[in-house]
Amino acid sequence: MREILYVQAGNLANYIGTHFWNAQESYFTYSDHEETIFNHDVSFREGETPQGDPTYCPRLISFDRKANFGALSKTNAIYENGDIEDSQLWWGDVAEYEHVPIEPHAYQTHLLQSDRESTFSALDSVHGIRYWSDFNRVFYIPRTIQMLPDVPDWQQSEGDWALGQESFQRYNEETELMESSVRLFIEECNSFQGLQLMSDTSTFGSFSSSFLMAFHDEFSRAPCLSFPLMGDAVPRNVNVENAVPTRKIVNDAVYLRELDSLSLLTVPILNPKTWSQGYWDVNLKISDDHYHTSSILSAHIESATLPLRLKVNNEDISSISENLNFHGTHRFSQLAGIFPVAPGATPQDFLRQSFNFSILRNSSMATVNFARRDVTRGFSASNLQAYNSWYSQEVIKGPFVSSTHAQAYPLPSSFPDIFRDEGILANHRQTLHTERNPVLPSASLFTTLSANSRTAEMFADYAKVAQTCVDRRKIGILPGLVDSLDDIKELVNDLWTIHDSYSERSVDG
């Protein structure tokens, strides 16, 4: 069944993941007259509650600090007493410590009091999001929820590579993570295709790197598709005399270097704080909070990986990675796209309005594409014609380019109100969503994964910062990241090696 195990590590990763799973939930059909184009078994696992009732929940492991889970706990409406498959008996003494419980968000109250598919007056209850669990619409099994101890306020955890490694080792020892939760998820699969990982690089980069190394020790043949969510420090703007942003940048660079060997395909994602304004957001009204920005990232990530979950496709993580890495040296790709795509789009809009979520523009040099995979969603005939016209003009320096055309991107009631003109949406939000009118509001979207020459710019930026640290002997500001000057020199060489693999000359050669 080509099952995927999903891993989310960090606060932004879980915000994106919550939107992702809410979209997956919206694809389920509950009528004998409806057929879905999605293979839900790829992402969901079938099980049963302790009472013997059947369940269908995400095949997900979610790591975050305990404070970031909000009112979400390991027990819920279908697993009130914990997971029967994971439960253990303890006959020793028990010491109880009570904390003031976090009140559920109004949106969760709305879901419990309604049929979960009510009118879009539900939007009124989505304001004031505090945690990613506030707008969650799915049930998780207990082993999905992996709460890490909170970091003390006085401790600077961002970019602390050693802290992340120690956190994973300690957590794995205390919970037997790899031998219990991970192994149980894998053993439930009939035809496990691989891991899809999203992780906050600044706070969970080294933790995720340690997790992947442990995972590959146990499942060496399983491929990994990674979406590292980069830190908010920009390499080309940093002053290495400033320790905090420099540490974040070197941390990002080390994590990317590790993913080069641990992940079959890696798609770096820019921190929303570094996004620039332009034509790409003319139809959007977004704030810089996680709830808004994660909804856009999730729409593109969910759509870019859509071929993995379609019934008609036989594609998997390995085949998509091989498509984008046709030349054998391109394990990093980029995510770009347009959301929403307005009616009456022109071929020029696909160039002008498409925003690259992976790499900041650093030069006026032309981009050379080596491979590309496009996904369009909910396109009208005229928009599809405009896309095909643009598509035919694009030059790919390699034999691989593909397109997938699918239904529009769904907008469940948990999705934020980010559109300037909701008239451009299909079945816009003023429409009631009830049993009599089961069609969700939706939006047209274009997204693309590509391997191209701009990846070289990103690795050059990181290599230059690392080289400056070498030149100025700034090893003391990088505790836990590097142990000696030779370590950072090795990092510089590795970054330039990856850079060189994305040059036109290396492809031609």
Image: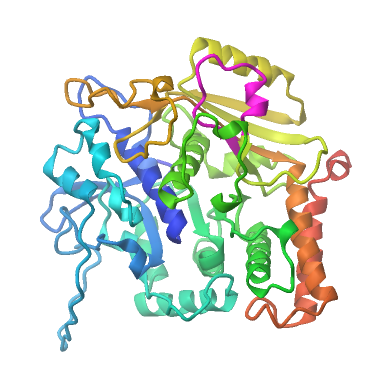
Q: Considering the whole magenta stretch, tell me its main secondary structure.
A: loop
Pinpoint residue 211: horizontal percent, then vertical percent: 50, 67
483 with respect to 291 (left or right)? right
* Quadrant in the picture for residue 309: top left
Residue ID at (37%, 75%)? 149
Residue at 23% x, 53% y is: 105
Q: Let me know if residue 465 appears in the view.
A: yes
Q: Quadrant of the C terminus?
A: top right
Image location (x, y in percent) of residue 250 = 68, 67
Q: Which residues are magenta?
A: 336-354
In percent of the image, x 26 and y 60: which residue is there?
72
Quarter of the rendering containing residue 75: bottom left
Q: Quadrant of the N terminus?
A: top left
Query: In the rendered image, which quarter is residue 184 located in?
Result: bottom left
* Frontmost residue, 282 versus 437: 282
Vertical comparison of 434 with 274: above or below: above
In this rendering, would 453 be left or right of 169?
A: right
Residue 444 falls within the magenta-colored stretch: no
Instruction: Examine the structure image and report whether residue 348 is included in the region drawn in magenta.
Output: yes
Q: Nearer the viewer, residue 464 or 404?
A: 464
